[in-house]
Image (spheres, coloured by chain):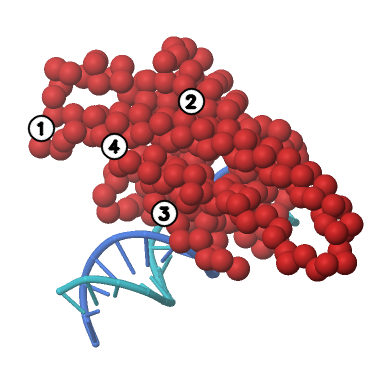
Chain colours: A red, B cyan, C blue
Amino acid sequence: MEYSSSLDPNTNPFDLHFATKLPKREPSDSASAKLLVKDEKANTLQDELNRANSENKKLTEKLARVSESYNALHKYLEEFQSRNSPENEHFQNQHLTRKRKQDLDEFVSSPTTESTSSDKSTVSIAYYPADKSDLSLTVKDGYQWRKYGQKITKDNPSPRAYFRCSFSPSCSVKKKVQRSAEDPSFLVATYEGTHNHPGLNVGGSRTVKLDLVQDHLVQGGLGKVEGKKERGTVREVLMQQMASSLTSDPNFTAALAAAISGRLVEQSRT
DNA sequence: CGTTTTTGACCCGCGC
DNA sequence: GCGCGGGTCAAAAACG
């Protein structure tokens, strides 16, 4: 899983490699004055490009760090899963595993979202910490939902609940919520589509950025486990804000999705 | 009494 | 075509 390979700046959607082909028009003899003006313009453009490039670099670094966090999380998961193989349960490792799981919860609880945008609809997955004794498959994500179905699925003891946004049909977002099969201490919510209206607490604040989330990821991984619930809800709100700010930039969303999921999305040129 | 939840029926795509 | 699994519908119940 070398997700970093997909971070190659040259494949990066917002890499501005057209910087290399700056205006190189054929000068006509009578246009030397015009050329001067053009040089000026080219300079300012160059400046702008430089700034854009450095910003691009920063973003790429951030992306790399987010990717690192994801890899670490993935490692945790794999470790835990191999420890938890069905035919061979190591009960003597229970508390050790338990501790790791708590770490994992924290790690995951700032909803680690993986979004995949296809030309059809947008699908994102969020993980929410939830008490195992809590039977309700509800997750407060800032939106109001109407449940329209529940099913028991093949390879998961807990049922899956189907929700539609309460503003349906004007807003056609759907979500599925199901307790994770491997680790029942958190819920997996799969969102489909994007809301065409604001949710609770989710204003148009576009300033919530990646580094904030990333800091939470890091701190969450090493931090303590007290006050899990409160921190969880705060993070849910954060997630909403992040999502809304991210979705306003399709390119970035796509890049992030590619980096996080480790898949290369074919970017169709339009 | 309007809205939401529950829950079995129904539908539909997929593999055989 | 048939059965299976997942997603949705809709009538009835529950809720506020």
User: What separation in Å lies between label 1 and label 4 (alpha carbons)?
Assistant: 14 Å
Judge from the rendering whether residue A76 lies leftward or rightward of residue C15; answer left or right: left
Asked whether the residues under marks 2 and 3 belong to the same chain, the reply is: yes
Amino acid type of disc 4?
Glu
Going from N to C along the chain, the mark reached first, 1 or 4, is 1
Identify residue type, mark 3.
Leu
Residue designated by label 3: A264
- Using a 10 Å C-alpha cutoff, classify the residue at mark 4 as few (fewer than 14 neighbours), some (14 to 19) or many (20 or more): few
Q: Dot 2 surroundings within 10 Å: few (below 14), some, or many (20 or more)?
A: many
x and y percentages locating residue C13 in the rendered image:
52, 52
Q: Residue furthest left?
A: A88
Question: Could you tell me if the residues under marks 1 and 2 are in contact, i.e. CB atoms within 8 Å?
Answer: no
SS at mark 3?
Answer: loop
Q: Secondary structure at mark 2?
A: helix
What amino acid is labelled 1 in the image?
Asn
The residue to which callout 4 is attached is: A182
Q: Earlier in the sequence, mark 1 or mark 2?
A: 1
* Quarter containing the C terminus of chain A: bottom right
> Which residue, given by chain and number where applicable, does mark 2 sit on?
A217
The relative height of residue A214 versus residue A140 in the rendered view (above or below) is above
